[in-house]
Amino acid sequence: MKNKNNLLIIIFGIILVSPSISLLFGFGNNVYLNDNRPLASIPKIGIYKEFPVLFANYFNDHFGLRNLSIVTSRWLKFNFFKVSPNKSVTIGKNDWLFFTSDIQYVDSVNAQPFKQNDLEQIKNNFLNIQNKFKNKGIKFYFLVAPNKQSIYPEYLPDYMKKINPDSRLDQLTSYLAEFKEINFINPKKELEEVKKTSPVYLKYDTHWNNMGAFVAYQKLGKKINQDFPIIKTKSQDDYNFVEKEAINKDLVEVQMGITEGFKETEMVFENKNVKSKIVEGDCPDVYKTCGILIKEINNPKLPKLVMFRDSFGNKLIPFISEHFRRSYYYWGSIPFSYSIVEKEKPDIVIMELTERELWRIKDELFVF
């Protein structure tokens, strides 16, 4: 018994001193941790009022074995207790992950439907914008990227019960169907159909996968084709397909801070006849990190495009760009500046917005 107690004391002592030894000698510091923020820097040593607080912030960000401890804790929470390390991420059935920050959670259970005056305001916004663009000889199209939980509600946990049967996207789609002049594109039905045979969203990421983006691109293209016959969407026959590991895992790596143990694959569309070339957008990942990306095709018969987008637009860009002599992609937030349109003088303007941000379109969409 005495030897057992001594062993426990030794183990406990090692646990206590390990962080200090790690801090002094630097071992165990090679574990990557995505803090999603800059760490506190070491303060200038001196006798001043702020020094204790600044040093405490520095120590809390750099104490020995910090990264290993946090990563291990997050991994154990998810894998053993099925608890998300981030309250903004919901763990669904079969470990499907969903982004459900406070306002997104409300949206996921259809708790705050649009009121009638909201729908009217949105309709008036669209009509006003389309008329202003029409006077400039420009066609305007609005594309919604449905929430992942709208396409895969069967993987939500049982406690997330729908308060209302229709989502705000369902409401808006039904309401705007009466106004044929509004180019409102919602690919929800098409995504639901394709998911029966192929995944259309990523399990560990907020966004659709390449197949989901392709489905949305086809519906958008068919709508544009009614006004621009030269725009003919490509079919799957125009691509080679290669199955690769999905690199986008924002719910795991960014939101939960876990970098190991989550793998899934997706089909990569390899265009057999790529024509568009990047002329501006020198970023590590041009389809992900570029606030502005411009592509061109040497064909003066094709129309010009300006697309205002969010992160769901990343996977749309390679598909859409093959139909325009110049395509200008701007990643930003509402309201957008009309000066971009004035400068580019496009034939077509597309606005793409994810479903969870639809509440924004009650307000001004462009600053004219």
Image: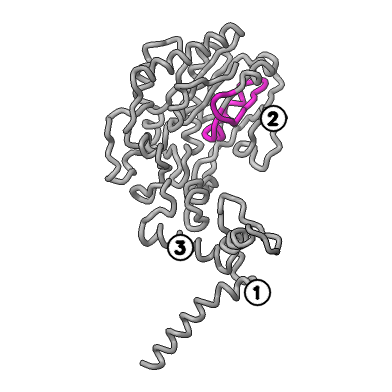
| Residue behind mark 1 | 25
Q: Which badge, 3 or 2, is on the more N-terminal residue? A: 3
Q: Nearer the viewer, residue 252 or 9?
A: 9
| Residue behind mark 2 | 277
Could you say where residue 170 lies in the image, as x and y percent from the top left?
35, 25
| Residue behind mark 3 | 73
Res 114 → quadrant: top left
* Marks 3 and 1 in Cβ contact (< 8 Å): no
Q: Is residue 360 left or right of residue 328?
A: left
Q: How is the image coloured?
A: one colour
Residue at horizontal 43%, vertical 89%?
6
Residue at horizontal 47%, vertical 54%?
262
Q: Nearer the viewer, residue 343 or 316?
A: 343
Q: Which badge, 3 or 1, is on the more N-terminal residue? A: 1
Q: Secondary structure at mark 3?
A: helix
At label 2, the amino acid type is Lys
Q: Secondary structure at mark 2?
A: strand
Q: CA distance from mark 3 to mark 2?
A: 45 Å
Res 184 → quadrant: top left
At label 1, the amino acid type is Phe
Q: Nearer the viewer, residue 221 or 237?
A: 221
Q: Is residue 16 magenta?
A: no
Q: Which residues are magenta?
A: 309-336
Could you say where residue 276 lies in the image, as x and y percent from the top left?
67, 27
Could you say where residue 316 lies in the image, as x and y percent from the top left?
55, 31
